[in-house]
Every structure is written in C-alpha cells, then in structure tokens.
Image (cartoon, rainbow, N blue to C red):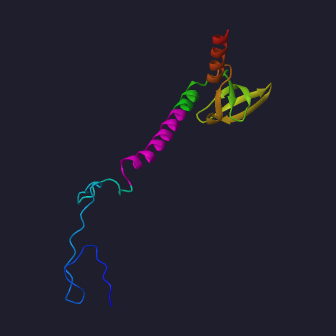
Amino acid sequence: MTTLFLSQPTTVSPGQGAPPAPAPAQPSQGAPAQSPEGGGGGGQPFGGMTILFFLLPLLFVFLMTRSQSKKQKDLEAALKPGDKVVTQAGLIGKLIEVGDRTVKLEIAPGVNVQVLKGAIQGVDGEPKPAAEAKDKAQEKKA
C-alpha cells in the first residue's frame, strides 16, 4: 500500500492514474505579495540602510582627518623665528630658523636641534581648548 501526501485534496483515488497537477501556492492573507523584480526589500543584502551603516563612519573619519591636516598646515605656515613651540615628543623650545621642511629649535642655551615641521604640535603659551573649557566651568561656579 502506498501513501500519497499532497497539499491539496484530490478526487482521484490511489492507483487510478496520475493525480492532477497541484494548483500554484497562494500567499497567505498576512503576507504581502512581492513583485517579480524583488521590490519587497526583505531579501536584499545591501539595502539602503546597510549602505548608510558603512558610509557614515567612513565619511566621519575622512572629515576628521581633513580638519586635522588643515590645522597642522595652518600651524606650520604661521611659524616664525622667536616662537616658543612644543613638539610631539614633548620638547619645548624657541625657534631659531624656519626652513621648508625643518626648523631649528633651541631647547637649552646653546643646544640646538633640527626638527621636522610636522613634529611641532603647537605654539607654547597659547591656551589649549581644554584649558579654556575648564576656565569657563570655574567662572560659572564662582
């Protein structure tokens, strides 16, 4: 005895010929019908939101890097002999000469070192933005 498992009831009893072709499946009432182009949006691996999750951090990093390099170029352009500067290594000294790529820095009387312009972090004596914020916070408390 053979058992037939069909999704729809048939009028043909087993053994009396081939069963009729099953009718095409109909979507259930709650599921929306998808267009043939796949416009449902559920199965697309790179939908609009996924692209935003990748592009926004990249854009943020690009803009941050650009602003930092612009600040560094402005700082390098404003350097002049006699300025007291701080290097990335923490050396504090007075500029003696300013060249195209390098500067001569006097870190002690009679002790001169040559440093790349890109290694200069800032002009010493300028208030730092963090220090300004602390000063404003202390003024508000007073």
When the figure is inspected, residue 112 is found, relative to residue 7, above or below; the finding is above
Percent position (x, y) of residue 42?
35, 54
Q: Name the residue rendered at 47%, 44% in the picture.
A: 58
Q: Quadrant of residue 108?
A: top right
Return the residue nearer the eye: 36 or 125.
36
Looking at the rendering, the stretch of residues picked out in magenta corresponds to: 46-69
Q: Is residue 12 left or right of residue 132?
A: left
Q: Name the residue rendered at 25%, 67% in the picture.
A: 25
Q: How would you classify the magenta stretch by its main secondary structure?
A: helix
Does residue 125 appear in this view? yes
When the figure is inspected, residue 25 is found, relative to residue 56, above or below; the finding is below
**Dividing the image into 4 quarters, which one contains the C terminus?**
top right
Q: Name the residue rendered at 20%, 71% in the picture.
A: 23
Q: Name the residue rendered at 54%, 30% in the picture.
A: 71
**Dividing the image into 4 quarters, which one contains the N terminus?**
bottom left
Q: Is residue 126 left or right of residue 91?
A: left
Percent position (x, y) of residue 103?
65, 32
Q: Is residue 77 left or right of residue 11?
A: right
Q: Quadrant of residue 11?
A: bottom left
Percent position (x, y) of residue 112?
75, 31
